[in-house]
Amino acid sequence: MADTSAFLDQQLVNGSLYESEQRLANRTGALMSAKITGRPTAEVIAVYAAAARPGNGNGIVLDIGCGRGASTLALTQVLPQATVCAIDASAALLGATRSRLRAHDLAVHTVRADFHHLPLPTGHAALAVAAFCLYHSPTPQAALGEIARCLAPGATVILATKAADSYASLDRLVAKAGLDPDATCRPGLYGAFHSGNLRSVTEGIFTVTAVEHEAHRFRFRDLAHAAAYLATSPKYQMPDDLAGNADAITDHLRRTLAEGPVETASVVSYLTATRSQGRP
Ligand SMILES: C[S@@+](CC[C@H](N)C(=O)[O-])C[C@H]1O[C@@H](n2cnc3c(N)ncnc32)[C@H](O)[C@@H]1O
């Protein structure tokens, strides 16, 4: 059995995981339509960003690992005078971010780059956001060091991640249904950078000013709804005819489990910190 998280498999992360926006869109759609409690993460990030007043509102703002651009849009809306720059390793997701902003008649700078090696000048940006992406790094501290290099002295960084045991009840469901009998033993997706080590990994590079943890609860209305999420998870090793196939997973779940709602939970954690006045 693989002993590293699928989210750290760089071949997967730089390949099929984000080569189109579809998997992420399906995953977010299934999760958000199941959410019972927990604030929208992009809105929380935007509140923190507005409070930071980067460059008195006029500064350069980096949205690192922007994904489909939910946080990029929120940042652009809450900081209309700022220059927002969306950065991601995936060309497809940068395209999705541009489309999302265009739909709101907003423009955004996009840069395709690896967050370990940002093609940006030293000490210019007033704010950086890295939400739900540093758990893809085998060396999140190195990525944070590179982000710190790009920030002006005293500038703010906002980080967001999830608890290491997020969605654990779904692992048990997948194992019980025989979809992946080893599901509960597989490494968690968020192991490299999670709610429990967010502060310790960041301290030493930045001065941490606040950490907030928020419980998120989800209730999938039925097995088909849960299957729509399960089909998007790279964590499980299902038979080839089921992997990634929500309809086939639904059929299998219906044959093996009682139909009904499925509940799960995660913790979302937000950290704000400042770059020290000296060189990082
Ligand atoms: C789960 S998405 C997060 C999206 C977004 N920040 C949000 O809050 O919804 C993770 C993103 O990190 C990006 N990513 C993963 N590894 C990266 C790296 N080394 N450098 C830059 N982006 C990376 C992926 O392409 C993907 O768009």
Image (tube, rainbow, N blue to C red):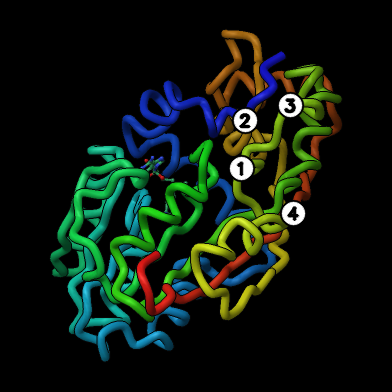
Q: Is mark 1 within 8 Å of ligand 1?
A: no
In the rendered structure, which amino acid carries the disc numbered 4?
Ala
**Separation of marks 3 and 1 at Cα, in angstroms:** 14 Å
Q: Nearer the viewer, residue 239 or 187?
A: 187
Q: Is mark 3 within 8 Å of ligand 1?
A: no
Question: Residue 212 occupies which quadrant of the picture?
Answer: bottom right
Question: Which residue is at a point 31% across and 41% down the rendered structure image?
Answer: 114
Which residue is disc 4 drawn over? 265
In the rendering, at what x and y percent does residue 96 appear?
26, 48
Name the quadrant of the C terminus. bottom left
Q: Does 107 appear above or below 236?
A: below
Label 2 near label 1: C-beta < 8 Å?
yes
Is 52 displayed left or right of 140 in the figure? left
Label 4 near label 3: C-beta < 8 Å?
no
Which residue is disc 2 drawn over? 5
Which residue is disc 1 drawn over? 192
In the rendering, at what x and y percent does residue 24 appear?
44, 41
Q: Which-is-in-front pick, marks 2 and 4?
A: 2
Is 90 displayed left or right of 280 in the figure? left
Q: Which-is-in-front pick, marks 3 and 4?
A: 3
Is 110 displayed left or right of 51 in the figure? left
Q: Which-is-in-front pick, marks 3 and 1?
A: 1
Looking at the rendered structure, the secondary structure element under dot 3 is loop
In the rendering, at what x and y percent does residue 173 appear?
81, 32
Q: Does 208 appear above or below 114?
A: below
Closer to the N terminus: mark 1 or mark 2? 2
Q: Which-is-in-front pick, marks 1 and 4?
A: 1
